[in-house]
Amino acid sequence: MRIMFYCQHVLGVGHFFRSMEIARALERHQVLFIEGGEPLADFTPPPHVKRVFLPPLMMDGQFTRVHSCGADLEAVKYRRTELLDQSLRNFAPDVLVIELFPFGRKYFTFELMPLLQRIRQENLPTKVVCSLRDILVEKKDQARFEEHVIRTLNACFDLLLIHSDPHVIPLDETFSRVKDIAIPLEYTGFVTRRPGQTLTPQTGLILISGGGSPVGRDLLACAIGAAQTLPDPHLRVRAFASPFLPRQDLACLERLAARDERSVILPFSSQFLDELAAAELSISMAGYNTCMDILSSGIKALVYPFPQNREQRIRAERLQQLGILTVLDSLQRDRLAEHIGLQLRDHKARPGTPAILQNGAANTAQAVEKYFGRS
């Protein structure tokens, strides 16, 4: 099949990596991957995936303003809409997968609704799939939001795939109108990755990550400072900066790390899961991809949920209940240092957890093939 996959990341790169992992699993098909955020440097896609880069649109850390990376905003919106229409016509996909919309990415209605309306109005054979993560952020007018989602989903989509285990986080915890969804709905399990190699964790090695977004800066600074207060000579800190971190913030973190020869700031790594497999402790935000990497690697982990909305806190607290990680309630340096010390002194294996469905990418590919058909 010919599968066109639309993914728009606006702050970090979690949406991009989850979507690309699903695209990777669609290896039996031709995939045209449409990227709407700032491109990630030095990323190589699988051979069967061709990428189309829309002029990038991103958001600030408070999710209050969309910016066009220095270009004229209206011109960027026009060009993006034009490129999407051209991609639909030239590629002629059997299936169009749209990540998150209409459950999120409301701002991008300007380019997505014309695409969906063209498919319906011209009676194109393209089937439309919504690719949705486990938890939705809260809205100011939740009832109005849910009504809009239901209308758009039932009118314009053919399948909803939820990348979660319903026994861990069902959609109806954050979306009350699940019963009104008229199209087929399937849970795929969580989209997780596996390390490329089997490594023995190095005693005292701490990995610190702020995720792919600029908002992880304060966590990086606090965690580096907290680790530096610990006297353990075997302790080593590898802190990974966001690819979108402003230059002045990166310089501040580098100066902080330079105070202690045991710590170092490193550039964002697309091979982060392999780095994680070699460490004893992870300190990070609690985004979907990071939590899934913690789950699949089995590493001890401290996570600080993004405070702007409920999404990361719900996920983190659920995984904490399952014994998978520990949630940090604040970025207080002395308190974090105490947490780090406790984790490094605890040599017990992580307790066994209930079986969690984790084959989300492969199951997504199977669902698309089951519903729409031919290989």
Image: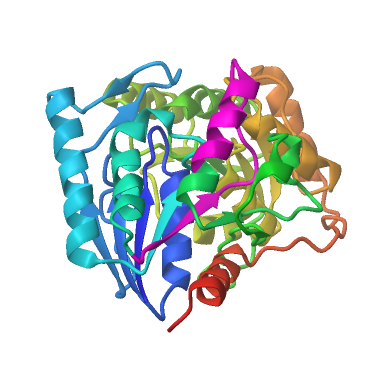
Decide if residue 19 is in sight here.
yes
Q: Is residue 128 magenta?
A: yes
Report the label total: 0
Residue at horizontal 70 percent and vertical 19 percent from the top:
334
Residue at horizontal 70 percent and vertical 34 percent from the top:
174
Q: Is residue 314 above or below residue 31?
A: above
Instruction: List x then y, in percent, for residue 40.
Output: 30, 47
Q: Is residue 296 magenta?
A: no
Which quadrant of the figure contains the C terminus? bottom left
Q: Quadrant of residue 134?
A: top right
Which quadrant of the figure contains the N terminus? bottom left
Residue at horizontal 37 percent and vertical 28 percent from the top:
107
Which residues make up the magenta segment?
Answer: 125-152
Q: Quadrant of residue 258?
A: top left
- Judge left or right: residue 342 versus residue 47: right
Name the residue nearer the viewer: 234 or 15: 15
